């Protein structure tokens, strides 16, 4: 497992490298090819929006990028490590140490305070109680919720819940933040606030952000927009200017 | 990793207090039932032993018939005579007293009150063999015993029922068609475990009973009190030889009487309550097992219900074994908690029931420890399957779960 977390990585190695990645679900007649050979390279510090119609393979790509799934063929190198060669547990360790997840449905633990939700990843890292609390408070402060640490998700608004989820994702200081339609359940004003928070994290902390979205408005916040169509990357362009 | 799993498990239990309580209910009842049954059974066993000890230590009882208890064969087993007791006194040493005993159930009358009780006819030796003490009055004189005078010594219950608080010594009871003077009052011995009240008794000289009530010379029982330190086994062997000789039993014939000492009686009686205790404990243990299945049930439901939560944990980077450990610890913690609550309730229940049933409360650390460990083991066994199911979930599927 040392190979998973080995440091440092040479500067010229990209954070993410997809080489002809395919993913096939099912077998024989019923087989469905979700990804048909994707090449993609993302460098540290980038902010990438992934767009595309449903069934275009963007969710499959995100699952593989997030080390939740393995490609059927091709290579996925994360910081130079061949993820497709890793076991389930090794991928879990990769997620634990380098990735942060933000979901459309927030996915906070119910009946659990914001502080306990945020410190959850630290528990799996075996951090001491005092360290956990300090880091969790710091993360909550970074998303502007330092006064809400005792509140449970039911006592928080949607925007606040997503902020708690973002705090949980960044509490471990991840290299890569994966956001799956983070504004999908929020109204327009909250959506823009969340996007500004993500841009802020990207700029100030240098966290690489990968975000799936349906909304072109939200994609405008990204530096780069990748379009998926029929299991392939259709377009990959840089935004001229950012908000 | 272990402590963080413990913390996670405890948090999960705290998050769902009502369900956690319902989950452990089966274990609580199971552990509670096992401990209560066994504790009360032990109390009953001890009460029986104490009861038999109160009959008198070093007591040997000789009765006609081949054995004591149910299925007793009395056919061809003649009763004893008062002369048998005299022969024992004359021929066997190291004895405190030998009492020939005959008895009869009658209704006794005092003024307007009457009371059904058992009258024992015996000699002064009866009070020695039976560990009786006088509360008031006196015992029989030799002259009274020889002449078969109408005098009696009564137990505390008879006094209460007929005389109330009044001092009975010197008064006259009416027994059937004759008047009988109360010359003594016995100290109370209390209830026996078999529901017999030992104080519900009247003792009169053997000859009086034989002449006025039974009309025969028969003696039902010989009670022999052996001196402390004497060899009871040897005395019992001597008694057997003597009785065979007096009853003219040929060498190839079986005894038509039985000789038992209190230790044997105690073993026989406590043996019964011990078997009953084990049976009750076993029945209660089944409910403990059912409680374990209840835990598995709820844990399986919990895994399904918390699929998304498990997905979050896996996405965040929880290892399979960490999720397994968390759910396993949850199950064990619930079961152990159930065990502790069960032990507490059982202690209270057995104290209350022991008082109600008039048996002593005997705390048995081994059954408490055993029940607790058993409930924790049930947590491991029935918690493993749901925990493994949780650990093997696919994080992508789990996150998509509604």
Image (cartoon, coloured by chain):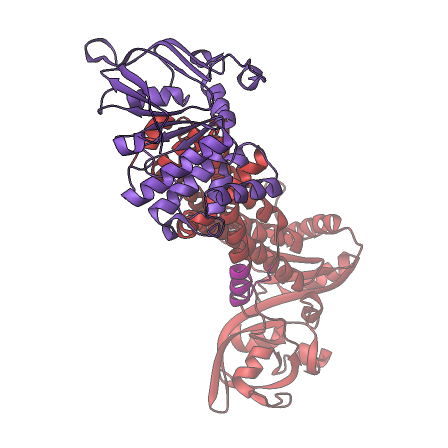
Out of B321 and B23, give the one closest to the viewer. Answer: B321
Q: Quadrant of residue B266?
A: bottom right
Image position of B371 (left or right of B138): left
Q: Residue B77: in sight, yes or no?
A: no
Q: Position of residue A197 (x, y in %)?
A: 41, 38
Tell me the quadrant of the picture where the C terminus of chain A can be found: top left
Q: Nearer the viewer, residue B97 or A100?
A: A100
- Main SS of the magenta part reads helix
Depth check: give the residue in front, A81 or B381.
Answer: A81
| Picture layout, residue B183 above or below residue B233 | below
Instruction: From the rendered image, report the letter of the chain displayed in red.
Output: B
Residue at 33% over, 19% down: A61
Residue at image coords 61%, 47%: B249
Instruction: Single out the residue that lies furthest toward the left.
Output: A29
Region rendered in magenta: B348-361
Give how far across and how far down residue A206 sits, in percent: 49, 28
Point out the residue furthest to the front here. A241
Task: Specify the colour of chain A.
Answer: purple
Tell me if residue B164 comes above or below residue A126 in the rendering.
below
Q: Going 69% across and 48% down the picture, which residue do you hit?
A: B241
Q: Visible in this render: residue B18? A: yes
């Amino acid at each position: 497992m040392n190979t998973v977390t080995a440091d440092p990585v040479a500067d010229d190695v990209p954070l993410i490298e997809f080489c002809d990645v395919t993913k096939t679900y099912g077998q024989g007649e019923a087989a469905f090819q979700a990804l048909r050979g994707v090449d993609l390279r993302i460098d540290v510090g980038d902010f990438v929006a992934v767009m595309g119609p449903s069934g275009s393979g963007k969710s499959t790509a995100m699952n593989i990028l997030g080390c939740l799934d393995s490609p059927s063929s091709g290579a996925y190198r994360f910081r130079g490590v061949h993820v497709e060669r890793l076991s389930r547990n090794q991928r879990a360790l990769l997620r634990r140490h380098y990735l942060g997840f933000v979901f459309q449905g927030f996915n906070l633990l119910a009946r659990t305070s914001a502080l306990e939700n945020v410190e959850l990843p630290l528990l799996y890292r075996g951090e001491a109680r005092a360290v956990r609390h300090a880091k969790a408070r710091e993360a909550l402060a970074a998303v502007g919720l330092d006064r809400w640490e005792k509140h449970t998700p039911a006592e928080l608004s949607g925007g606040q819940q997503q902020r708690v989820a973002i705090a949980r994702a960044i509490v471990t200081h991840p290299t890569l933040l994966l956001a799956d339609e983070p504004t999908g359940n929020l109204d327009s004003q909250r959506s823009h606030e969340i996007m500004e928070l993500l841009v802020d994290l990207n700029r100030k902390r240098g966290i690489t952000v990968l975000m799936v979205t349906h909304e072109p408005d939200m994609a405008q916040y990204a530096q780069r927009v990748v379009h998926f169509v029929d299991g392939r990357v259709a377009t990959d362009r840089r935004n001229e200017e950012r908000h | 990793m272990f402590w963080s799993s413990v913390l996670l498990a405890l948090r999960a239990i705290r998050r769902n207090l009502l369900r956690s309580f319902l989950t452990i209910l089966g274990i609580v009842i199971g552990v509670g039932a096992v401990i209560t049954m066994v504790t009360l059974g032990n109390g009953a066993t001890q009460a029986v032993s104490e009861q038999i000890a109160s009959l008198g230590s070093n007591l040997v009882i000789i009765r006609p018939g081949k054995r004591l208890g149910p299925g007793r064969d009395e056919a061809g087993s003649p009763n004893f005579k008062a002369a048998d007791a005299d022969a024992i006194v004359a021929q066997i040493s190291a004895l405190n007293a030998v009492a020939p005993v005959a008895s009869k159930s009658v209704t006794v009358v005092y003024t307007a009150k009457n009371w059904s009780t058992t009258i024992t006819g015996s000699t002064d030796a009866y009070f020695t063999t039976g560990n009786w003490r006088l509360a008031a009055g006196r015992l029989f004189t030799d002259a009274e015993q020889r002449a078969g005078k109408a005098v009696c010594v009564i137990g505390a219950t008879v006094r209460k029922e007929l005389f109330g608080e009044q001092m009975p010594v010197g008064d006259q009871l009416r027994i059937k068609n004759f008047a009988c003077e109360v010359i003594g009052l016995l100290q109370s011995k209390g209830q026996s475990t078999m529901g017999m009240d030992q104080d519900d008794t009247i003792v009169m000289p053997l000859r009086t009973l034989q002449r006025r009530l039974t009309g025969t010379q028969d003696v039902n029982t010989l009670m022999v009190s052996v001196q402390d330190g004497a060899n009871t086994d040897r005395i019992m062997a001597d008694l057997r030889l003597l009785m065979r000789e007096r009853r003219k039993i040929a060498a190839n014939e079986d005894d038509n009487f039985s000789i038992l000492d209190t230790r044997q009686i105690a073993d026989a009686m406590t043996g019964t309550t011990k078997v009953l205790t084990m049976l009750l404990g076993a029945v209660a243990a089944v409910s403990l097992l059912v409680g374990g299945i209840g835990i598995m049930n709820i844990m399986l439901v919990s895994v399904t219900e918390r699929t998304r939560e498990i997905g979050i944990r896996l996405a965040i980077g929880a290892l399979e074994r960490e999720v397994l450990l968390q759910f396993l610890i949850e199950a064990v913690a619930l079961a152990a908690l159930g065990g502790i609550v069960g032990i507490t309730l059982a202690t209270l229940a057995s104290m209350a029931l022991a008082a109600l049933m008039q048996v002593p409360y005997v705390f048995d650390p081994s059954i408490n420890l055993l029940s607790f460990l058993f409930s924790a083991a049930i947590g491991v066994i029935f918690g493993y399957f749901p925990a493994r199911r949780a650990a093997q979930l696919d994080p992508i599927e789990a996150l998509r779960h509604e």
